[in-house]
Image (cartoon, helix red, strand yellow):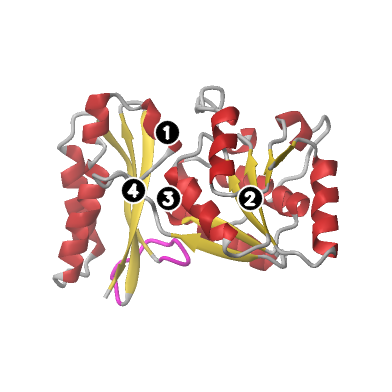
Amino acid sequence: MNTIRSVSDMQQWACATREAGRRIAFVPTMGFLHEGHLALMREGKGRGDYLVVSIFVNPTQFGAGEDYQDYPRDLEGDTEKVSSVGGDIIFAPSAKEMYPSGYQTFVAVEKVTQNLCGASRPAHFQGVTTVVAKLFNIVKPQVAIFGEKDYQQLVTIRQMTRDLNFDIEIIGMPTIREEDGLAMSSRNKYLSSEERKQALCLFNALNQVEKLFQGGEKNPKKLIDRAAEIIRVQPAADIDYVKVCHPETIEDLERIDDKALMALAVKIGKTRLIDNRVLKN
């Protein structure tokens, strides 16, 4: 397995690989890898001749006062994990390599980014779509794999891929959870032992909402109220949003006719966690 740090070297490898008729599968990450990331990589191994994993903490998707400087980093440990699933290339550029002096171009996807995380983190998705578009042009994959835990991000990347005519298949993979149900996240390391217990309120809220929905409740307000009630019991929990949305447009729903996305963002202490569940008849 090789680690590539320069954009030009990565592009040269990608061009040569595609010219040889080989298929590139790509998993973009910000590093500090966990089993959720490794599940995406295993999927990628089955969909391409070569698996490329990017490890890059992208500064443009962090807002003022967010945890860019403190975001956990462990390139040595990440390299071992990518190797353990048979990864072929790690692309690990510096911020200066990705955004050199004078950089001034950004990609913005509009409607699907307005709700949920886009409402509370207004510059976040512009940073995400910009870096993913750049990575697509650098790595040149035929298929890219993303996790459904970041559901709005997945919808946004699919929209950008269609709109900008990227010839790339976008695969969404189910959320990987700890044994007790907590969605795996690199930010879980911020949680104290007591906060870790309280963080289960997100998973518990989704489970209770699922039961109500399958029992016939189709009123989003009642589902939202029930989820919020469960979360607010925990003293460390501070709700950013609890919403029921259309799973493709990410617009709030007044009634559920077929399926819906229940999406949560909650601060447990200082750690912001997200989770979701697609509700289907």
- Label 3: which residue? 116
Looking at the image, tell me whether mark 4 or mark 1 is earlier in sequence order: 4
Q: Residue at x 63, y 33 (%)?
A: 59
Residue 56 image point, x, y percent: 63, 37
- Label 2: which residue? 129
Left or right: where 56 falls relative to 93? left
Residue 264 image point, x, y percent: 33, 48
Q: CA distance from mark 4 to mark 1?
A: 14 Å
Q: Nearer the viewer, mark 4 or mark 2?
A: 4
Q: Examine the rendering and report whether any part of residue 49 can be seen.
A: yes
Q: Quadrant of the N terminus?
A: top right
Q: CA distance from mark 3 to mark 4?
A: 22 Å
Q: Nearer the viewer, mark 2 or mark 1?
A: 1
Q: Secondary structure at mark 3?
A: loop
Left or right: where 249 falls relative to 1? left
Q: CA distance from mark 2 to mark 1?
A: 21 Å
- Label 4: which residue? 177
Looking at the image, tell me whether mark 2 or mark 1 is earlier in sequence order: 2
5 lies above or below 180: above
Looking at the image, tell me whether mark 3 or mark 4 is earlier in sequence order: 3
Q: Which residue type carries mark 1?
A: Arg
- Label 1: which residue? 187
Mark 2 crowd level (few <14, some 14–19, many ≥20, 10 Å Cα): many
Left or right: where 76 falls relative to 39? right
Mark 3 crowd level (few <14, some 14–19, many ≥20, 10 Å Cα): many
